[in-house]
Amino acid sequence: MIPWQLIDSAPIPRGDGELQLYQRDREFTINISGGGVLMSTHAHASEDALAERACREIDGRSRPRVLIGGLGMGFTLSAALRHLGPEAEVVVAELVPAVIRWNREILGEFAGHPLEDARTRVREGDVGNVLKEERQGFDAILLDVDNGPAGLTRKKNNWLYGLDGLVAAYTALRPQGLLAVWSAGSDRAFHERLRKVGFSVRQTQARAHGHKGDRHIIWLAARGA
């Protein structure tokens, strides 16, 4: 069997440890040091589903504006672009500069080079800052940050999934907007926090790889008028 090879690594800003890019033949993974695989070019069906389900909810809106928290390997961004029209704008916020570089130099071909799409706007930095800056600025917000509410890479992500972060997301959404959140597993307390902030919440599941692989959770949280 072909062994995995470490291609590059990068520290997590104000976080613990580093992200590591591994390659085995034509497959790549991004790992967290000491914590295993975060994402893979081989298994990304649940990331695709996050974007597909969110974009379905805002279908038909004029000039939709979408925020994606976490670039990852670009699959969520790519799926969103496929399901949005030519007048859409997709802002993707990525905290780790090296992840943006990996997507431009190595990983882009696997997701169809979504960073090269004219509708894409890249923000290097914390998605939480974008939420704080915007008021009713987005039709949909997609969060694929860390491992979901039970984060692995950065303690400050607790803010994003706590009450203050969810209030910021609610405020950044336009009326009838949608917050979609990816998670590696279920989290009843997070579900209840969404409801407490004022969202109407649905919890759905998606497989990591087609009809196989781990079952991941996608919350669809709608803001009212």
Image (cartoon, helix red, strand yellow):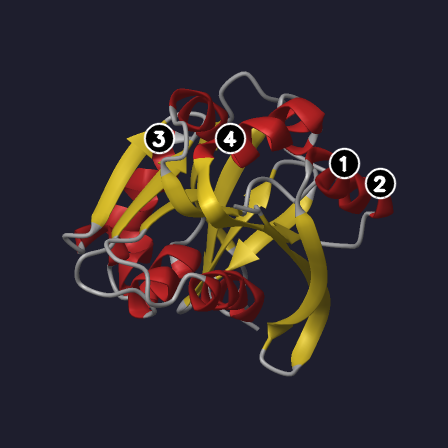
The answer to which of marks 1 and 3 sits earlier in the sequence is 3
Secondary structure of the residue carrying numbered label 4 = helix
Secondary structure of the residue carrying numbered label 1 = helix
Tell me the quarter of the picture where residue 9 sits: top left
User: What is the C-alpha distance between the residues marked 1 and 4?
Assistant: 14 Å
Residue 34 left/right relative to 137 = right
Which residue in the protein does label 4 denote?
A: 171
**Residue mark closest to the camera, 1 vs 3:** 1
Which labelled disc corresponds to residue 5?
Answer: none
The answer to which of marks 4 and 2 sits earlier in the sequence is 4
- What crowding class fits label 4: few (fewer than 14 Cα within 10 Å), some (14-19), or many (20 or more)? some
Callout 2–callout 1 Cβ contact below 8 Å = no
On screen, 111 above or below 187?
A: below
Please name the amino acid that badge 4 sits on. Thr
Residue 200 left/right relative to 62 = right
User: What is the C-alpha distance between the residues marked 3 and 4?
Assistant: 27 Å
Which residue in the protein does label 2 denote?
A: 189
Please name the amino acid that badge 2 sits on. Ala
Which residue in the protein does label 1 denote?
A: 196
User: Could you say where residue 30 lies in the image, as x and y percent from the top left?
Assistant: 51, 48
User: What is the C-alpha distance between the residues marked 1 and 3?
Assistant: 34 Å
Which residue in the protein does label 3 denote?
A: 97
Tell me the quarter of the picture where residue 32 sits: top right
Callout 1–callout 3 Cβ contact below 8 Å = no
Residue appearing at x 85%, y 47% in the figure: 188
On screen, 115 above or below 128?
A: below
